[in-house]
Amino acid sequence: NPATVKLRSAESDEPGTRVRVLGRVHRMRAQKDYVFITLTDGYGYLQCILTGDMVKTFDIMTLTLETSMAIHGEMRAVPAKQHAPNDRELHADYFTIIGRAAGDKEAITTRVAPDADPQTLYDNRHLVLRGETSSSVMKVRAATLRAFRKAFEGHRMLEVSPPAMVQTQVEGGSTLFGFDYYGENAYLTQSSQLYLETCLPSLGDVFCVCPSFRAEKSLTRRHLSEYTHIEAELDFITFTDLLDHLEEMICSVIDHVLAEPEIAGYIKQLNPDFKPPSRPFRRMKYDDAIQWLIEHEIPNEEGQPHKFGDDIAEAAERRMTDIINQPIFLTHFPAEIKAFYMKKDPEDRRVTESVDVLMPGVGEIVGGSMRMDDWDELMNAYKHEGMDPKPYYWYTDQRKYGTSPHGGYGLGLERFLAWLCARYTVRDCSLYPRYTGRCTP
Ligand code: 4AD
Ligand code: MG
């Protein structure tokens, strides 16, 4: 009996090697005396050619896409112009059917009709994932997580696992998902930032990769109700250190990802125009962005010219980013439109030491800032926001027991991927996206 191999390794087997492969029918093409089957097992694709009596069997004549099967045979070299993966194919001499596929959803699994109803596709996400595009995005996603962990490791930062069930808010009360926790009110976390801050004295610089939850009321192409949040916190730094670190992180993650040939290939297919961003990133103060928007006659949400203090809404932000067409560090947002914990700029107390990283096609992918490290100032901030400081005692204590200048950021993995893989919506960068009205499958 020949050795059973995964398809990615079968591709590079020497001609003449006998193998047994297991997988599902991804594509097939029948001619009079031949049947070509492209088999996939999630690792790769292999073209298999069946001839002779095999093509006259009932199993092959009624074969449906996604049917799982075993094929035995010999690896052969084929001319490059046949476009077989790695110019190899399997010349079959024996096969068995393992699980026949119903065959009624072939349009969804392999050849998604361009006009397919998006709701039908999201209902069938479990099958859509089998398609080449979705599975490539998921592989780039996994590689991106590997790359982030490697880049954090390079900075000697430690991964921690903060809780998802919490009794505090981070990014404002309006997007909290609440639930009953043994008779008490609790929430699904919006961000692990406050917990990361508490780790600095014991562990040094830390990061986490955790789900964050936001009850976003509006349906947009870049908001999920549950997303993967990559967050980091750095101790004894300045705001400039934070920006430099962020730039270095983003660039080394891209380098790591592109260093994997298989992954670089997927990115090339998904986003043929992708070029790693060049350094240094453009740094732009919020105030200058407002001027830029006025000059380019891009109105605010009320349809009026932008003015200092306006939130730069998604549409305006995206237009600006698309026109500038390179990564932007947008810094120094007014305190009034930002979260309670952000440190004020000592040179202009109206604004904060804050940064959003904006990418073409998506807009904001990162939010970060220096944190208020003074106890009195933080107490005033709770008051200003109308927040009860009591549940935050553990966060406030950080300022009482050896405070430090520190800061960090959170990056939305799905947004990063939407940029890297040129996807229209972050939903396509999530395994099973959750957004307003959808919690299935
Ligand atoms: O800008 P945000 O709200 O910042 C924070 O949560 C900080 N506490 C992070 C920190 O400093 N540790 O969120 C950070 C990032 C955004 O830039 C965006 O990429 C992503 O999280 N994000 C979302 N992604 C998908 N769906 C949503 N509803 C998101 N909300 C935020
Ligand atoms: Mg933000």
Image (tube, rainbow, N blue to C red):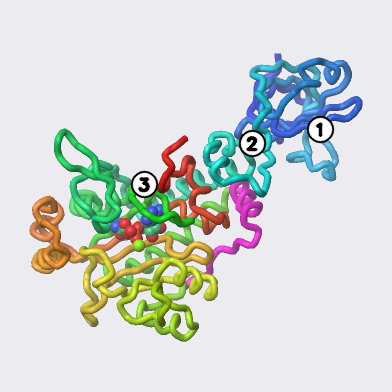
Q: Which residue is found at the position 32% from the left and 63% from the top?
A: 368
Is residue 210 part of the magenta span, yes or no?
no
Which of the two residues, 298 or 82, is positioned nearer the viewer here?
298
Q: Is residue 113 visible?
A: yes
Q: Which residue is found at the position 24% from the left and 72% from the top?
A: 336
| Magenta-drawn segment | 261-280
Q: Which residue is found at the position 19% from the left and 36% from the top?
A: 181
Tell me which amino acid carries mark 3. Val
Ligand 1: give its quadrant.
Answer: bottom left
Is 355 rendered above or below residue 196?
Answer: below
Q: Where is residue 344 shown, x and y percent of the image? A: 22, 73
Is 333 rendered above or below residue 385?
Answer: below
In contact (CB < 8 Å): disc 1 and disc 3: no
Cα gap from disc 3 to disc 2, whole angstroms: 30 Å
Q: Residues within 10 Å of mark 1 (few under 14, many from 20)?
A: few
Q: Residues within 10 Å of mark 2 (few under 14, many from 20)?
A: many
Is residue 275 part of the magenta span, yes or no?
yes
Q: Quadrant of residue 338?
A: bottom left
- Does residue 197 appear to the left or right of 435 in the view shown? left
- N-terminal-most mark, 1 or 3: 1
Front of the two marks 1 and 3: 1
Tell me which amino acid carries mark 2. Thr
Q: Residue tagged by mark 1?
A: 29
Q: Where is residue 431 shown, x and y percent of the image? A: 49, 41
Q: Residue tagged by mark 3?
A: 209
Q: Quadrant of residue 410?
A: bottom left
